[in-house]
Amino acid sequence: MARELASKRGWLSVARDAVRALLPVPTPKRLQRYASHLASSYRSESNTYPAWIRAFEPSPASYAAFAAQHGQWTYRPLVSIIMPVYNTREDVLLEAIESVRAQIYPHWELCIADDGSTIPHVRRLLEQCALDGARIKVVYCEKHGGIVAASNAALKLATGDFVALLDHDDLLHPLALHFVAEAIVHNPEAGLIYTDEDKMDEQGQRSDPYFKCELNYELLLSQNMISHLGVYRRTLLAEIGGIREGFEGSQDHDLALRAIEKLKPDQVVHIPRVLYHRRAAAGGTAVRANEKPYAVETARKAVAEHLARRGVSAEVMPAPDMPAMIRVRFRVPFPAPLVSIIIPTRDRADLLGQCIDSLFAHTRYTNYEVIIVDNGSVQSATFSLFARLPKDRVRIVRDDSPFNYSALNNRAVKQAKGSLVCLMNNDIEISGGDWLGEMVSCAVQPEIGAVGARLWYPDGRLQHGGVIVGMGGVADHAHKFLAKGQPGYFGRAALQQSFSAVTGACLVIRKEIYEEVNGLDEQLSVAFNDVDFCLRVREAGYRNVWTPFAELVHHESATRGYTTTPEKWQHLLREIEFMRARWRQALLHDPAYSPNLSLNSESFDLAWPARINDGAV
């Protein structure tokens, strides 16, 4: 029994190996191609981003086929591209304009506002472009008013159904407006559409793709995940008053936050394609965000005002180790709610003692009780530990039923006095910081369900950075084994965000939600019960949130193999099949992850092949 409880800590890794070794990949043919390709080429030198582009982006030869689709649409929206211009280098400005002219989707207009440029070639070039046809409109501002004033001047020229934002030194992919228009046709209620992006250097080489996830509210608070390319319904922009002055440098972030206040989640549409190329030039935020410190300040101001409009009490500050990004620290209610910390165990007094002692020594949040579920301990060291624990803070609940991790927790939750419950493994060690206060501050937010912590292996590598479903066949941890101090993929190992699931090794949730979804499913006695639980919480309408600002040590073995009996392997396989049957569609697409990223690596590597099926790749 002790081995069952101890090995529970590593079942995601074991289960992932079982899926790979013993089961067919639970994906359509496109993912089966991924599996076969993986064996020969994964992580090879040829698997660079340029190679990925050649392999999986539509080729120019396919553009005519995309263009032919336009005649089949009953609605072909006009897209107005607004572009503020100020003293732009001549070749760069011309390339930006040419990237619009090169669009295979013809229903666009380019609205340019020159913000009082003093370099003669700017006006000469704009005047020449304006002569080419009515689709290019130019207004010349009398004086230099800044990017917001110029953007709003360009916006006044727009007559399209939707408005796209383009910087004067960036480029659109030739298929950008085609896929934007396609998204509008298929999502007629859409109010905001955004795409993936990458960087382009002076030689035209593309790099550093940001393959985004679907709208992730907590991540949007942390960083501007919308731009670029951001496309807005024009009537929505009019309703919210256009682009606001006073937010220069982060005006797009402020715009996105104000827009989502007026939209339902399904009205925000993500196109998982790189359709925007940011110019990687010195002095631009495409190279280093901290080159424009005023933009960092205005971003925090935008988030703070957004939360205030929503009536959310929170402190907005620089993210630790990533000062260009944002940390939102929600307020803990007063009086602080009682948290019931539930720890199942059988013997292993060494692990449990370390867990409890560190909990008492390093937990700043004081209003909690501990419920230790003793599942058949027999060793004297365990009973000696129980005897020394403070009875006013710790309850020992004896449960000699056959080992079932889900059932043990469910029965303990029924006895919990707290309005929040914290599921905790007996191999967790609290090392400091206000870990519980941070998790509680998130869990009490009305729209948030389960809250997970950032867990580290004792050697300083990351053990848990959120759970991605579909990875490895069923689920696995994001950024596993990442070195401490590394921000991960576009900061996602260091920023608060939503995930489909978080680990039950340390999970906080309101007791009413736990009961609403009927707790952990007792058919999953060992593996995946936390993943299944979180997916049901999400299905009930809540967001599951991972916060890196609650940090603990998890003494799960990072290198030791797991030995088990044939009976236990068969039990594990039954639980894998259970997950595949219940969550087959959810395992095919995780909204917190990109179909352009690998399901066989926790490191946000490129997917080979990409999991987008448009018939043109």
Image (spheres, helix red, strand yellow):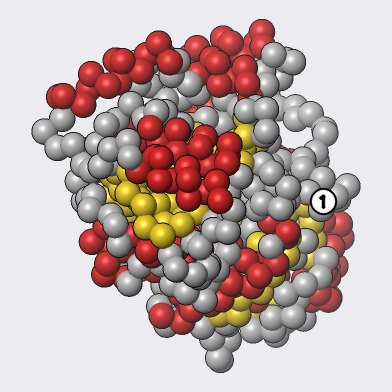
Relative height, residue 239 to residue 596 (above, below)? below
Count up the numbered dots: 1
Q: Secondary structure at mark 1?
A: loop
The residue where tag 1 is placed is: 484
Disc 1 marks which amino acid? Lys
**Outermost residue, bottom direction?**
335
Is residue 285 or residue 40 the one in the foreground? 285
Q: Position of residue 231 (x, y in %)?
A: 36, 50
Q: Position of residue 472 (x, y in %)?
A: 58, 28
Q: Quadrant of the C terminus?
A: top left
Q: Position of residue 604 (x, y in %)?
A: 63, 36
Residue 288 can be seen in this image: yes
Q: Residue at point 77% right, 43% down?
A: 482
Q: Residue at point 15% right, 30% down?
A: 73
Relative height, residue 523 to residue 564 (above, below)? below
Is residue 421 or residue 550 the one in the foreground? 550
